Amino acid sequence: DTGVSQDPRHKITKRGQNVTFRCDPISEHNRLYWYRQTLGQGPEFLTYFQNEAQLEKSRLLSDRFSAERPKGSFSTLEIQRTEQGDSAMYLCASSLTVNSTNEKLFFGSGTQLSVL
Amino acid sequence: AQSVTQLGSHVSVSEGALVLLRCNYSSSVPPYLFWYVQYPNQGLQLLLKYTSAATLVKGINGFEAEFKKSETSFHLTKPSAHMSDAAEYFCAVSVGSSNTGKLIFGQGTTLQVKP
């Protein structure tokens, strides 16, 4: 068990550019979550997957955001045409859940995005 | 709709003193409540969770929290602070009526421990 890993740790980009982040969950964890955390705030739910299926997206999530989890393993989060307001820490978490109850999330260290 | 409010963005205690971090929740269904800790440059780590089995919940590192329905509170305590407890703490509620990973977090409380 190597934990949830996220890559890159830091990303600086110019406004209007596209960026992609990667999350590798704990092996055999079937659920994967993306959260966003801005300075001074708690994490905010973005979306989650069960295996390869994306089950829910936050209504706050812009159409510029897309996430995938091919083959139910790693996941990518892409932001198109980045805006300064996208600057935040993007957190990934995974869990092994059998009956949708009593989940325990394991969080990665996050990817810090700065949009200039 | 569900929400959590953490009272106090910064709490400072002396080493060995009582730690009390306050969290109030709002929920139209019986809530599942959590406390997470975030150390610098690390991911959030679960301290403890309330799932209706017992109102007093014991967690890791000597922390505990008591669910008080009448006060809609879930405050986090530790009898004696240690320097290593300095971190940011988040209270969270599970969305809906099941204990899933979709959580609503409070704004966080930074705990400072003075020697």
Image: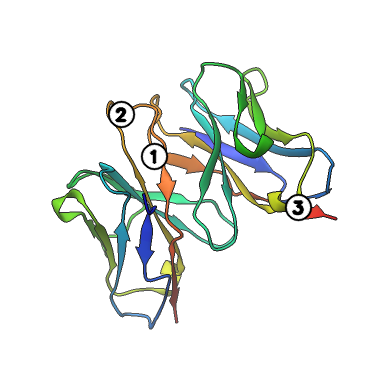
Whole-angstrom CA distance, mark 2 to mark 3, is: 37 Å
Asked whether disc 3 touches disc 1, contact meaning CB atoms under 8 Å apart, the reply is no
Q: Is residue A111 left or right of residue A47?
A: right
- Mark 2 or 1: in front is 2
The disc placed on residue B102 is 1
- Mark 3 or 1: in front is 3
Whole-angstrom CA distance, mark 2 to mark 1, is: 11 Å
Q: Nearer the viewer, residue A111 or B98?
A: A111
Q: Is residue B73 left or right of residue A66?
A: right
Output the chain of dot 2: A
Q: Residue furthest left?
A: A71
Q: Is residue A110 above or below residue A10?
A: above
Whole-angstrom CA distance, mark 3 to mark 1, is: 31 Å
Whichever of labels 3 and 1 marks the residue nearer the N terminus, that label is: 3
Q: Secondary structure at mark 3?
A: helix
Q: Are marks 3 and 1 on the same chain?
A: yes
Q: Secondary structure at mark 2?
A: loop
What residue is shown at x 46% (from left), y 21% (from top)?
Answer: B29
Determine which residue is flagged by label 3.
Answer: B83
